[in-house]
């Protein structure tokens, strides 16, 4: 078996899942996949900030299509849609429809202010 030595684990990139999503009773009923998806969305926020994807009110948003979620999580369309709906139900994201075949604009909300 191969082990990590010293700071070797720092060689990898990681998605960060806020501990509050695990420990806080408000999120006890949330599926683990939804918590993972939220962590991925938080990671994507960095790129959006770098690209200056801000709305007219200065709020950062991301684009994350159902197809990309399906590929990233290895799930089907229905599951990806249910995970997005769950994040909305818990107040962790807000989706704004763009129409005309354009992807939804997704606002990742602060979990600490729910």
Image (cartoon, rainbow, N blue to C red):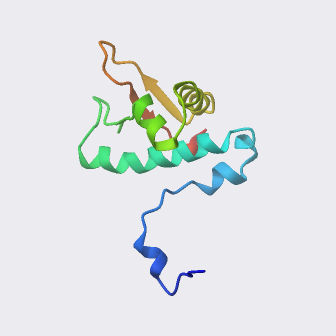
Picture quadrant where residue 111 is located: top right
Q: Is residue 112 visible?
A: no
Residue at the far top in the pictured view: 100
Task: State whether residue 44 is above or below residue 57.
Answer: below
Q: Residue at x 58, y 29 (%)?
A: 79
Front in this rendered view, residue 108 or 3: 3
Q: Position of residue 19 (x, y in %)?
A: 63, 57
Q: Is residue 5 visible?
A: yes
Q: Residue at x 54, y 26 (%)?
A: 81
Front in this rendered view, residue 1 or 81: 1
- The quadrant in which the C terminus is found is top right
Q: Position of residue 73 (x, y in %)?
A: 52, 42
Q: Residue at x 68, y 52 (%)?
A: 22
Classify residue 46 as left or right of residue 8.
left
Classify residue 21 as left or right of residue 14.
right
Q: Residue at x 56, y 54 (%)?
A: 17
Task: State whether residue 46 is above or below residue 114.
Answer: below
Classify residue 97 as left or right of residue 89.
left
Q: Position of residue 84 (x, y in %)?
A: 54, 30
Front in this rendered view, residue 108 or 36: 36
Front in this rendered view, residue 58 or 76: 76
Q: Position of residue 78 (x, y in %)?
A: 57, 24
């Amino acid at each position: 078996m191969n082990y990590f030595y010293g700071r070797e684990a720092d060689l990898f990139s990681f998605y960060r899942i806020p501990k509050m999503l695990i420990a806080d009773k408000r999120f006890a009923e949330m599926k683990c996949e939804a918590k993972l998806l939220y962590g991925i969305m938080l990671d994507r926020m960095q790129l959006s900030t770098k690209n200056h994807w801000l709305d007219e009110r200065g709020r950062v948003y991301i684009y994350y299509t159902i197809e990309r979620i399906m590929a990233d999580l290895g799930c089907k369309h229905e599951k990806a849609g249910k995970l997005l709906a769950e994040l909305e139900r818990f107040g962790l994201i807000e989706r704004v429809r763009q129409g005309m075949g354009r992807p939804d604009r997704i606002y990742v909300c602060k979990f600490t202010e729910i």
